[in-house]
Image (cartoon, rainbow, N blue to C red):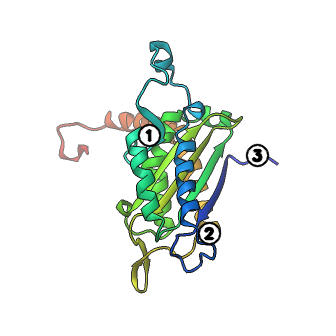
Amino acid sequence: MTSPKVIFNCKFTYAINSPDNKNINKERAIKKINGMFDYYSDDKKRAMNMFDYYTGNLNKSENMNLVLENGKYATSDEIAKRKKQYARYLENSHLWQGVISFNNDYINENITIDNLEQKMIKKVIPEFFKKCGFSDINKMSYQIALHTDTDNLHFHFSFIEKRPNTLSKDGLVYRRSGKLTKAEIDFMKNSIVHTIEREKIYTPLLKETNKEIDELKKYFNPKEKNFI
């Protein structure tokens, strides 16, 4: 047996007003949100930026170890703002938290960490939301944080509905089910694998295709109408 390329774990916290929430404790839920953001943005767990290391700027940046929807690192003020927002969102939406873990060699052989980080936040997670039945990406709040404090590189991520965003026969509602389906989980894992291996698979193919096109161009006159 070979070890899996991507390990995906996810849990959820019921919305305060969810009819399925049998243990309503708003104070504990808010404390959990604050702890989540503090843990995600912990500088001790972030990847070392070699440029910052050599210029002496390591840990002197105002940016925190948390990537927002736009692909940029959050500031401490933005994280404080999110803590308040999530306390409000949790009134009606579940909060999902997950971990995506990798074998380090698998990452290093196929893609750079910063490239993967951007593709995760801008492509993989938005596509995952569609699979989960969320209607509008702009009605979702989410973030990721890369941690390097264990033997395996891993992303922490979380997301929540800002407004009703799950299509039902009654229109848009908050998602009732907190548990992700196997199909949703498999979609996320497959999408990540495809993203990581994409350059290794498609870059050589693209080079070969361009080479063949250049060879074919030799048989045509660029001035003729049929050149294209």
User: What's the amino acid at mark 1?
Assistant: Thr
SS state under label 1: helix
Which residue in the rendered view is the most extreme toward the bottom?
Answer: 169
Label disc, if present, on residue 179 of the rendered structure? 2
Residue 38 appearing in the image: yes
What residue is rendered at 42% in x and 39% in y?
A: 76
Measured as percent of width and height from the top left, residue 192 is found at 56, 49
Type of the residue with mark 2: Lys
Q: Label 2: how many residues lie within 10 Å, few (<14), some (14-19) or many (20+)? A: few
Residue 15: x %, y % from top left: 52, 70
Q: In the displayed structure, would residue 46 be above or below residue 189? A: above
The label on residue 209 is 1
Answer with mark 2 or mark 1, whichever residue precedes in sequence. 2
Residue 45 lies in what quarter of the image? top right
Q: Which amino acid does label 3 sit on?
A: Ser
Q: Is any atom of residue 72 visible in this view?
A: no
Q: Position of residue 89 (x, y in %)?
A: 43, 64
